[in-house]
Amino acid sequence: MLTTGALRAHLLAAGLAGTVATSREENLRSYRLFAARDPRVLLGLDPAWGWDEAGLLRLMADKCGVSGDPAHRSGPDVIDPERTVRGLDAFAARLGAAAARRVPVLLGTGHPHRLLGFYVALADALSAAGCLVLTPAQGRCVDITTRFGLRTYLLDYVRGVALVREPGPPGEGRVPGAHSHSPLPVRAVLESAAEGGGPLPELVVGDHGWVCGAGQLGIEAIGLADTDDPALFVGEAEGQVSVAVPLDDGLRSASYLPLTRYVLNRACLSR
């Protein structure tokens, strides 16, 4: 069992919280783009409130612990580990409630290189608890606009976790999937589930567009988010997202293993 104190120490030692790799410049650029309603940072969210840069900075200081000083324009930024721990506790409580009710769940990630192992462990535990882990639309094509233009990706699942990958045969050394912020994959998955007459998820677990895209459609959604992804925290503030956990989402996969143990234990899903 990982104690709260040990978790807090790991967050700081690994750089998941405390001074993080996401720079102040990256954060402020994202807040500026979000205030301009740039779809690249909205992640499928349609904010109900008017958000300017100053309001977003205040929100992110409250939700994540980044510096609330508007004069701080460059250099490193921070995440308060206490907010991360509280977020993980709330995240675990939602997982535990879903497991107790054995509801259908969907897990998806736009960070397969970093976070796939975290979500796979959750999928395994939820399945063992009696939840139906949904996998609709496998192999379906999704056209996503990227900085390189319009690209076609394939929806795929790895041990119950949805992601998108570039077309082509799987091979040794092939990356597990593509990095994506788009809400289009979760919309395609939900559309396929509805068309097939199968169950829709009562809980979506993930990050980026998987969480915001599902939350915007009225499905309970919980996820992890970095400080340059304000959409999840805006969604939480407005009620479209149930839980947004602040942490650095771009570290080595092994950095998230202690979080897995902590969350599963708090959700009473450890085996």
Image (cartoon, helix red, strand yellow):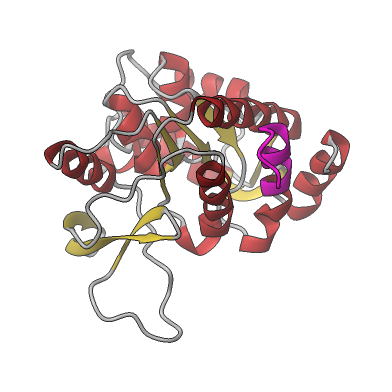
In terms of image quadrants, where is residue 156?
bottom left
* Along the viewing direction, whichever of 109 and 48 lies nearer the viewer: 109
Whether 25 is drawn above or below 71: the answer is below
160 inside magenta stretch: no
161 left or right of 73 in image: left
The magenta span reads: 260-271
**Residue 232 horizontal/vertical position (percent):** 44, 31
Q: Residue at x 57, y 42 (%)?
A: 24
Residue 252 visible in the snapshot: no
Q: In the displayed structure, would residue 238 be above or below residue 70?
A: above
Q: Position of residue 154 (x, y in %)?
A: 23, 63
Q: Is residue 128 left or right of residue 144?
A: right
Image position of 204 (left or right of 83): left
Q: Is residue 104 above or below residue 22?
A: above
Instruction: Tell me which residue sits at (35%, 45%) in the image.
Output: 134
- The image position of residue 230, as x and y in percent, is 45, 32
Is 34 or 86 nearer to us in this picture? 86
52 lies above or below 38: above
| The one of 18 and 54 positioned closer to us in this rendering | 18
In percent of width and height, residue 264 lies at 67, 41
Instruction: Tell me which residue sits at (72%, 47%) in the image.
Output: 261
Q: Tell me, yes or no, whether the highlighted magenta stretch contains residue 268.
A: yes
The quarter of the rendered structure image containing the N terminus is top right
Q: Nearer the viewer, residue 265 or 148?
A: 265
Q: In the image, 51: left or right of 128?
A: left
